[in-house]
Image: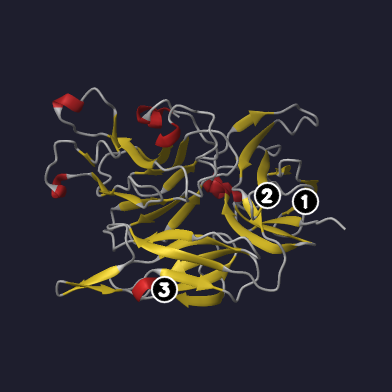
Amino acid sequence: MGTRATVLLLALSPLTACGLSGPEGMFVQLYGRVVDENNEPAIGLDVSVASSDGAAILETTTNNKGWYSVAVLATELEGHDIQVQVEGDGYASSLAWIDLTLFEGEMMEMPSHPPQLWSTWTRQLPVLQVASEASVGHADGLMLDTSTGQPPVEDQGGQDIPVELELEIRYGWNAPDSEPVLSTVVTGLGPMLGRWAVDDLSPGLYTARVLGAGGFTSARFPVLVRAETQRETRATVTGALASGEIRASLVWGDSPADLNLHVTGPRGSVSPDESQYERFHVWADEPYHPSNASDVHDRVVTMDLLEDGGFGPESMTVHDMRSAGTYRFSVYDHSNAASSSSESLSWSDALVQVWIGTRQPRFFQVTPGVEGNLWPVAEWDSQGDIVYRFAEMGAGEDEFDIDLF
């Protein structure tokens, strides 16, 4: 018998909060992709969509590339947070919490049959993975400091003292902290400094929350517990931020060798030689803004760590979002700058973690199996609120195309 799985989406809270309310005929098209633990398309899976009260159930199946799509009336999908659950014979159950406000969408005109269905909003959801079914699986990883790129240590009287970090593992992708803790692990010391492993969970998607310790603040990142194939999970921790700061870090897998983290934003008051540019651009070749701010206390943005040997981390901090407008973090595949159709970035396991002052930390994962050498990750406003999460990859001939997509 072939494998078979079900994807269940449940709306949780008011849809009007994500700007999807409107005329009675407004409906929402949700589309996404399911892949297995080797990032191969999961074909022929049943997909069911339901509102929080169980109404408006729709069914479809993933196609030969693992994609699915469903359209739901906004009045019936009364929530902007949804759960996506994948389960079935041969696969371990996987669950994800998804906030529709964070994903790219646009208004589209639709045929008026029936007449009240005159338009729709589309939302592309993150790619979800299903793991092979087994009684227990395995995951392991390495925690790195955003300021040094090394396993975490604490300065005590001029000496670097290794820091043990406690990780709480919860079931589901982007699982909220209110969910029960299923496993707790502690990073190692000595030659295992910063490393962790878990062997007591069933295969599937999980979220790790790092508890703050040794001067480091909390962090969150996704974990795929696998039945067989093993792949190290790299993630980062960072020191405490002031209430008006945003910090982002980038880590990735074995290839490509050279990914770059970028941030762009409103320039505000500038020096005369920068006045022709509307937005600042900080990256490896321009490591801080303003460019004439030699004193770190005068900088609006600083590139904290540059990794030129592959894997990461790279990190940067927006110290003061003093100018109104949007601030964008992006990832550029410098190794494939000459190939806008390359899929190397999409297969890189790139992970961007973001800390916004004292708020709940976020994470973003690259979408596998798509073309493009530019990943515009997300945008924030000057209040530190996320306003847009990109669902597609872009193409750039060089780093100066970062803000054009």
Q: Earlier in the sequence, mark 2 or mark 3?
A: 2
User: Image height check: is 189 above or below 290?
Assistant: below
Q: Earlier in the sequence, mark 3 or mark 1?
A: 1
The answer to whether residue 116 is visible is yes
User: Image height check: is 237 above or below 109?
Assistant: below
284 relative to 274 in the view: left or right = right
172 relative to 350 in the view: left or right = right
Q: Nearer the viewer, mark 2 or mark 3?
A: 3
164 relative to 202 in the view: left or right = left
Location of residue 150 in the rendering, given as x and y in whole percent from the top left corner:
32, 61
**Residue located beneath label 2 in the image:** 34
State yes or no: discs 1 and 2 in contact (Cβ < 8 Å).
Answer: yes
Disc 3 residue type (three-letter): Thr
Location of residue 387 in the rendering, given as x and y in whole percent from the top left corner:
45, 43
Q: Residue at x 63, y 38 (%)?
A: 122
**Residue located beneath label 1 in the image:** 45
Q: Residues within 10 Å of mark 3 (few under 14, many from 20)?
A: many
Q: Nearer the viewer, mark 3 or mark 1?
A: 3
Disc 1 residue type (three-letter): Leu
